[in-house]
């Protein structure tokens, strides 16, 4: 039987996870509300999105180093995947806004797909996937709204 700590989302994790959405929601909103600083808000959103995408990918480096039940193939895939989101993010930072937002959007979706595929093998807590699903949904909505603004708002 799993412990409560493994199944129940710790309050500090909820605070950190949901709090991390504030810049996404705020910056995506400012794109629509402050026409004079669109470039600033867009670049800030892309930069923040790149940092967060790199962060969520890095979970797999930790998993690859610390989960003893992984076989060698799983461990290798975890190490390889751990750097993929950072590469998506880095590439996005060099693109024009619309392309950067699309790359980040695809990166967050790919990360969630990887989370879903790997959660059981990695022994991640039961609360991890539901939290990642909620966070990814909000992040993707913000990126889509920003992409829409980039397409029609200027």
Image (spheres, rainbow, N blue to C red):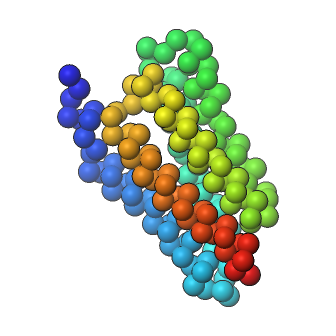
- Image coordinates of residue 129 in percent, x first then y, are 41, 40
Quarter of the image where the C terminus is located: bottom right
Which is more toward the observer, 46 or 132? 132
In which quadrant will I find the N terminus? top left
At horizontal 51% and vertical 23% (from top left) the residue drawn is 65
Q: Residue at x 74, y 65 (%)?
A: 98
- How far across and down, in percent of the image, does residue 59 sit? 50, 36
x, y percent for residue 83: 65, 36
Query: Is residue 28 positioned above or below 72 on the image?
Result: below
Count of numbered tags: 0
Residue 10 as seen in the image, left or right of residue 140: left
Residue at x 56% of width, y 19% of height: 75
Residue nearest the observer in this picture, 24 or 142: 142
Tell me which corner region of the image, top left, top right, bottom left or bottom right, holds residue 32. bottom right
Name above or below for residue 103 compared with residue 118: below
* Location of residue 73 (image quadrant): top right
Regarding residue 7, the answer to whether it shows in the image is: yes
For this orientation, the residue located farthest to the top is 71
| Percent x, y of residue 31 | 61, 77
User: From where the camera sits, is residue 44 visible?
Assistant: no
Residue 75 vertical placement versus 91 (above, below)? above
Q: Is residue 110 left or right of residue 103?
A: left
Left or right: residue 122 versus residue 37 is: left
Asked if residue 40 lies left or right of residue 27, the reply is: right
Question: From what the image shows, is residue 78 above or below residue 150?
Answer: above
Q: What residue do we see at 44% from left, 46% from top?
A: 132
């Amino acid at each position: 039987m799993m412990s409560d700590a493994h199944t129940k989302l710790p309050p500090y994790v909820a605070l950190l996870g949901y709090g991390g959405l504030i810049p996404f929601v705020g910056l995506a909103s400012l794109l629509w509300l402050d026409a004079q600083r669109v470039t600033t808000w867009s670049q800030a959103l892309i930069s923040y999105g790149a940092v967060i995408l790199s962060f969520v990918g890095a979970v797999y480096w930790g998993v690859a180093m610390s989960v003893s039940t992984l076989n060698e193939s799983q461990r290798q895939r975890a190490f390889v995947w751990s750097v993929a989101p950072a590469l998506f993010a880095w590439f996005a930072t060099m693109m024009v806004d619309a392309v950067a937002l699309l790359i980040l959007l695809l990166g967050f979706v790919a990360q969630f797909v990887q989370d879903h595929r790997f959660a059981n093998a990695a022994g991640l807590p039961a609360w991890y996937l539901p939290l990642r699903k909620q966070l990814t949904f909000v992040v993707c909505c913000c990126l889509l709204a920003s992409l829409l603004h980039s397409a029609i708002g200027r």
